[in-house]
Amino acid sequence: MTLDLDVFLKLSSFGLSLGAIVWTFFATRQKDTDKRFKEGSDRMDRHENRILSLEQTVKVMPGKDDLHAVQIELTRMSGTMETMSAIMEGNQKIMSRLETIVSRHEDHLLSEGRK
């Protein structure tokens, strides 16, 4: 009977040890899993916020057609500015000639007053 009791004690201690190992494994695994799940959930929330921010930024950025319209408008304005520059240059030449004519008239009138 001692042999049976000895075997029973060994098997029961082995079973108890195995049970403690299994229980500890699942108990700590659940805590770690919950902690990792919470961290992963928080990280996914941060990523979602960043993605939403990027989407909003991209939505308000000008597109290809908008940039093309700006380019066309700048080209048109450049042509208009060149036209205005040519007109201003012409007006400057006209004013130069008028100043020459007016100074001749002044000289003529002043010289006539001396005679």
Image (spheres, rainbow, N blue to C red):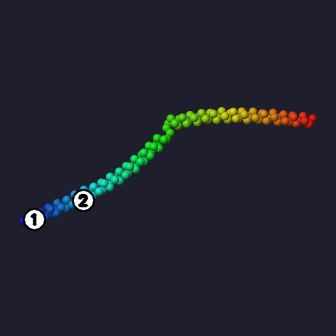
Q: Residue furthest right?
A: 115
Who's the residue at 58% across and 36% down the image? Answer: 74
Q: Quadrant of the C terminus?
A: top right
- Using residue 8 as the reference point, say whether residue 47 is left or right of it: right
Give the number of marks.
2
Residue 91 shows which numbered tag?
A: none
Q: Quadrant of the N terminus?
A: bottom left
| Residue 13, position as x, y percentages in the image | 16, 63
Quadrant of the rendered structure where residue 70 is? Answer: top right
Q: Gap between marks 1 and 2, in whole Å?
A: 28 Å
SS assignment at label 2: helix
Q: Residue furthest bottom?
A: 2
Q: Tell me the amino acid under the disc marked 2.
A: Thr
Relative vertical location of residue 52 with respect to residue 77 in this rendering, above or below: below
The residue indicated by pointer 2 is 24
Q: Tell me the amino acid under the disc marked 1.
A: Leu
Q: 60 or 10: nearer the eye? A: 60
Would you call the spot at circle 2 few (<14 residues within 10 Å), some (14-19), or many (20 or more)? few
- Using residue 112 as the reference point, say whether residue 56 is left or right of it: left
Who's the residue at 62% across and 33% down the image? Answer: 79
| Residue 96, position as x, y percentages in the image | 76, 35
Quadrant of the rendered structure where residue 16 is? Answer: bottom left
Q: Earlier in the sequence, mark 1 or mark 2?
A: 1
| Residue 47, position as x, y percentages in the image | 40, 48
Who's the residue at 14% across and 63% down the image? Answer: 10
Q: 110 or 82: nearer the eye? A: 110
The residue indicated by pointer 1 is 5
SS assignment at label 1: helix
Q: Nearer the viewer, mark 1 or mark 2?
A: 2
Q: 18 or 31: nearer the eye? A: 31
